[in-house]
Amino acid sequence: MDSTPPRDPKPDPRRDPRPLDGRQEPLPFLMLVPNLVTMAGMCIGLTAIRFIFVGRFEIAVGLILLGALIDGLDGMIARRLRATSEFGAELDSLSDFLNFGVAPGLLVYQFALTQTSGLGWVFVLLYVSCACLRLARFNVARAEPQPGGAHFTGVPSPAGAMLALLPVFLTQAEIFPMRTVPMLVALWLGIVGALMVSRIPTFSPKSLRVPRASVIWFLIGTVTVVGMVFTRFSLLMVLIDLLYLAGLVRAAWLHKRGKQH
């Protein structure tokens, strides 16, 4: 008996979605826009690292913050254009790891931890590793709906980067010279890393609702923020970090209270 398996019949071109010549259908340019924005954000993060190496910390901080802004835009653009994809989501996570894990860790190390005999580098590794773990956990749970979409689990990586840079903001705002207490800076990096991988429910912009009676005050607050961006930027970032930390303390207290009940 002939044991040779029968050959597959010639594929029917009417059923095969791939063209016979191997070419694929052109992709609409709008489908690429979110990924192009993500790549631009990644390049900004790499450029921030370049300025860290030459000691231009103010520029590096500005680029990291710009990367955070772009990180919020690419997802919004993808949803508006209905151009979300698994590839785009993975690319966004890799860009976030660079912008909000590696870049802030290197910046804080070069800014305040180079004289810690290597111990400061251990905390940088801890922070960056926690940022990586936080993003990996987010990717795994991406398909699982959040409870009402009302919060994140743990501190998101962009917010973690802003908290990690708090010692830099405090120094630049002339509130306290954090370079004089490098081990406190190192310990703070470790705390921020722990917050990123924690299970604390944290604020999500999607849950923000503005009462109609308070809209005018939000508009006035926007004017104040814009003014501080151009006059006392570092002080503004300190205030934002402190407000976020206050929200974290409240969220942690409510979370613990809910568990007890």
Image (spheres, rainbow, N blue to C red):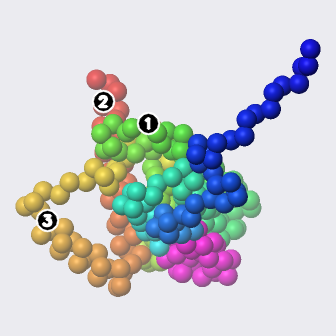
Can you see residue 7? yes
> Is 61 one of the magenta-colored residues?
yes
Few, some or many C-alpha atoms within 10 Å of disc 1 (few <14, some 14-19, many ≥20)? few
Q: Are marks 3 and 1 in contact (CB under 8 Å)?
A: no
Nearer to the camera, 220 or 58: 220
> Is 124 one of the magenta-colored residues?
no
Residue at the spot of label 2:
258
Of the residues shown, which amino acid type is indicated by label 1? Answer: Glu
Question: Which stretch is magenta?
Answer: 40-64
Name which of mark 3 and mark 2 comes first in the sequence: 3
Residue 105 locus on image (x, y percent): 61, 62
Q: Do the residues labelled 1 and 2 touch (CB within 8 Å)?
A: no
Nearer to the camera, 75 or 18: 18
* Residue 159, image quadrant: bottom left
Which secondary structure class fits the magenta region best?
Answer: helix
Residue at the spot of label 1:
144
Mark number displayed over residue 215 = 3
User: Residue at the spot x=7%, y=61% of the render?
Assistant: 213
User: Residue at the spot x=37%, y=39% of the render?
Assistant: 146
The CA span between labels 1 and 2 is 22 Å
Can you see residue 194? no
User: Residue at the spot x=18%, y=67% of the render?
Assistant: 218
Name which of mark 3 and mark 1 comes first in the sequence: 1
Answer above or below: position of 106 versus 12: below
Residue 140 locus on image (x, y percent): 54, 39
Q: Is mark 1 on a helix, strand or loop?
A: loop
